[in-house]
Amino acid sequence: MQKDADCSASETLASESGGDGELEAREDETKTTNTMFEIEFRTGDRSSRLRLKKQLQDSLCQYLHLIDGLAKLERPAKPSTAICGNEAILRAIGAVNESESDMNRLGATGRILHATLFMGKQVSSSASSTTTSGSSNRVKWEISPDDSEERRTEAWVGLWREFSRDSTVLMYHLKNHYALVFAMREWLEPPSSRAEQDQKEEEGSLPRNLRCREIPTARKGQRPSVWIAWDEVYKTLCSWHDYKISSISIE
């Protein structure tokens, strides 16, 4: 019965692929590939075999990751866009640049859309690249959870300058969501209580005002619905390499 089932499966595959000739060609190609792999695996030195094994494992994991992500993206109830990532957005910018009708709808005929991963953890050098549209997946402003307070202030000022550029918007990839950065604000908060002021005076130092920095964005939907503290934004960006603030502009 097993033999009959194997024959039936082969006949079905042959009919779907256009006949026995094409099926045989595919089998020959597979055998050739497998033979080449066997030769390379058996004749190479130990380090080469380990390197090849690691490459195969990485490729298989990446394939399974993509299949799983596609299934989640296509599910009817609560589809997840997690598989898309920042790279998909960079590619989409490139696709818009290549579409004359899309550029016309944007009122950007004769101009170019640029997308940059402006701020976040740096991706590995082997994964960084630049598309023909000028979009790059290399982070322009790299940050780290070990950054000093001075460095965090510099990052805030750098983000403020990028936000203030003409024809530029910032998009924040936070936890399970993408949303625009609609504004930025900063102010000094006085000491919270009189007791805190008295304590500082007794210690011989003046009470310090608390510097507050926030951005309005959205945790769900696309309308500005929440002000998020800069400290929280910084922590989120440092927690995973795919959390980024992207800069998108028309030039």
Image: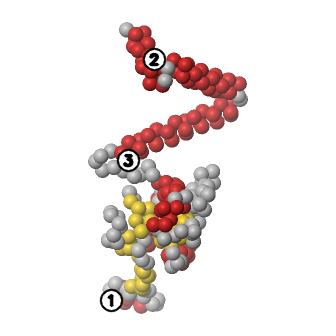
Q: Under tag 1, what secondary structure?
A: helix
What residue do we see at 47% from left, 68% from top? Answer: 106
Q: Is residue 233 above or below residue 7?
A: below
Q: Mark 2 points at which residue?
A: 10
Separation (CA) of disc 3 from disc 2: 32 Å
Q: Is residue 46 above or below residue 217?
A: above
Instruction: Check contact, mark 3 vs mark 1: CB within 8 A.
Output: no
Q: Is residue 12 above or below residue 74?
A: above
Give coordinates of residue 28: x percent, y percent.
59, 20
Between discs 3 and 1, the one toward the N terminus:
3
Q: Name the residue under label 1.
A: 194
Depth order, front residue of 104/235: 104
Separation (CA) of disc 3 from disc 1: 54 Å
Pick out the residue farthest to the left: 77
What residue do we see at 46% from left, 38% from top? Answer: 64
Q: Which colour scheme is used?
A: secondary structure
Q: Name the residue under label 3.
A: 73
Which amino acid lies under the numbered mark 3 shown in the image of this protein? Leu
Q: Which mark is drawn over residue 140?
A: none
Left or right side of 105 for 33: right
Q: Is residue 68 visible?
A: yes
